[in-house]
Amino acid sequence: VWLPDVATMYPAEAATTIVANAPVGSSLQLAGARGYIANTGNRDVLRGWLVGDGVPPGLSIDAELRWAALERLAALGALDVEAIAAEAASDGTSEGAVHAAACRALRPDLNAKQEAWQALMHDAATPNYELYAVANGFWHPLQEDLTVLFVERYFDEITELAKLRSGWVLTRLAEYLYPWTAVSPTTVEFTDTLLGRADLDAGVRRSVVDASDDLRRALRARRAFA
């Protein structure tokens, strides 16, 4: 399969090129579509794909790809709570409920973030897989100006989470909810202070060490190549 050189293209542009040149219906075309959805800012294209308009030949918008498009629209601020509820009702599966939870957390809206934080930190009734989806959707590179309000709160409140949750659930949430988009020396300082606490849960400590390693490398890269 011949593909143009995509190394110097922006991610969405490169993904579009892959979709256009890959064999129709191939796994390569599907991978390109996923890459496009994850990186595009074009709301109209995504909305079109959801109703079958402009879908590349051979590409099937199944439930997984549909939810990926919906999550991207949510992150772009182009999906309201009513639309999310309608999609969840239309799907009716446990996976649909998980994706809907992610969509709600991804919305660039302070109330949405506060509701997500409340569910993560204080709601014992939310199913675990929905919690994971909310935590994964909470931080987003396009929303740093909004989520910066919660960076310090993570370090202040993560130890209290051990009073509500335990075991694997606690360690996964500590990792997923780590503020990985806040690539700054301040986040590193908060991290080191947290890791210096003698009362920190061992599972939370492992998760924070692992998550902060990626952030530290990202910070070094920005310093080297800014």
Image: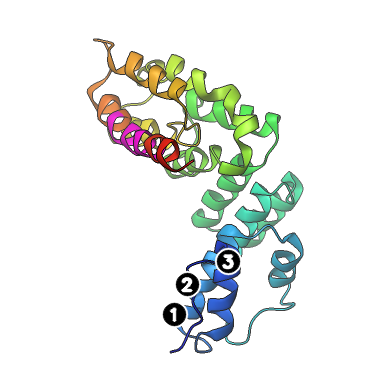
Q: Which residue is mark 2?
A: 31
Tag on residue 36?
3
Tag 2 secondary structure: helix
In the rendered structure, which segment of residues is drawn in magenta? 209-218
Q: How many marks?
A: 3
Visible residue check, residue 63: no
Q: Is residue 215 magenta?
A: yes
Q: Is residue 135 above or below residue 100?
A: above
Tag 1 secondary structure: helix
Are the residues tagged 1 and 2 within 8 Å (C-beta)?
A: yes
User: Mostly what secondary structure, the magenta segment?
Assistant: helix
Q: Is residue 145 magenta?
A: no
Q: Which corner quadrant of the image does residue 189 belong to?
A: top left
Residue at 51% over, 26% down: 123
Q: Residues within 10 Å of mark 3 (few under 14, many from 20)?
A: many
Given residues 203 and 217, the one toward you in this image is: 217
Visible residue check, residue 179: yes
Tag on residue 27?
1
Q: Hey, what amino acid is under mark 2?
A: Ala
Mark toward the start of the polypeptide (2 vs 3): 2
Q: Residues within 10 Å of mark 1 (few under 14, many from 20)?
A: few
Tag on residue 211?
none
Residue at 37% over, 17% down: 159
Q: Quadrant of the N terminus?
A: bottom left
Mark toward the start of the polypeptide (1 vs 3): 1
Q: Hey, what amino acid is under mark 1?
A: Ser
Q: Position of residue 192 (x, y in %)?
A: 33, 18
Distance Cα–Cα, label 1 vs label 3: 14 Å
Tag 3 secondary structure: helix
Are the residues tagged 1 and 3 within 8 Å (C-beta)?
A: no
Residue 19 shown left or right of residue 145 in the figure:
left
Q: Nearer the viewer, mark 1 or mark 3?
A: 3
